[in-house]
Image: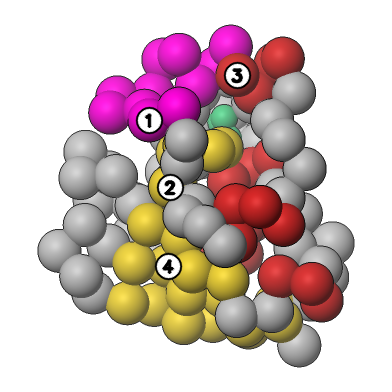
Amino acid sequence: MIRITYVEDGGTRHTVTAQAGRSLMQIAVENGVPGIDADCGGSCVCATCHIHVDTPWSERLAPPDEVELTTLEFAVGAEPRTSRLSCQIAVSEALDGIEVRMPSTQR
Ligand code: FES
């Protein structure tokens, strides 16, 4: 199992486990993690699954493609170095232990 920790803006941590192949968005929704609304269901058009991924974890991810970058332009508080869309990140064993942060605008 892969362990993932979602950290709310206020510091509340939600650690869950998941199978490889699920997206960080799907895992958050399935586990009732607040702050990941995922209004478009993972179609990469809503930006309500916005998260921040810090180093060293960000370095283990494939970079965002053009579609994700375009949608991130609509994410409130997006930061070029850390912002990602959680629906576009599939977890693998290499991400066991990853921590991601939710933006202050998502609760
Ligand atoms: S769920 Fe809509 S962009 Fe990720």
Residue 61 is situated, as x and y percent measured from the top left of the image, at 72, 50
| Amino acid type, residue under disc 4 in the picture | Tyr
Residue 35 belongs to the span the image colors magenta: no
Going from the N terminus, do you reach mark 1 or mark 3 first?
3
Q: Which residues are magenta?
A: 70-80
| Residue that label 2 marks | 52
| Residue that label 4 marks | 6
Front: mark 1 or 3:
1
Q: CA distance from mark 3 to mark 4?
A: 22 Å
Circle 4 Cα neighbour tier, 10 Å, few/some/many (<14 / 14–19 / ≥20): many
Identified at 43% across, 47% down, the residue is: 52
Instruction: For mark 1, give the secondary structure.
Output: loop
- Image mark for residue 95: none
| Amino acid type, residue under disc 2 in the picture | His
Residue 72 belongs to the span the image colors magenta: yes
User: From the image, which quarter does the N terminus lie in?
Assistant: bottom right
| Residue that label 3 marks | 69
Q: Quadrant of ligand 1?
A: top right
Going from the N terminus, do you reach mark 4 or mark 1 first?
4
Q: Main secondary structure of the magenta part?
A: loop
| Amino acid type, residue under disc 1 in the picture | Glu
Instruction: For mark 3, give the secondary structure.
Output: helix
What residue occupies the far bottom of the structure in this picture?
Answer: 1
Q: CA distance from mark 1 to mark 3?
A: 11 Å
Contact check, label 1 and label 2, Cβ < 8 Å? yes
Contact check, label 3 and label 2, Cβ < 8 Å? no
| Residue that label 1 marks | 79
| Amino acid type, residue under disc 3 in the picture | Leu
Residue 7 is situated, as x and y percent measured from the top left of the image, at 34, 67
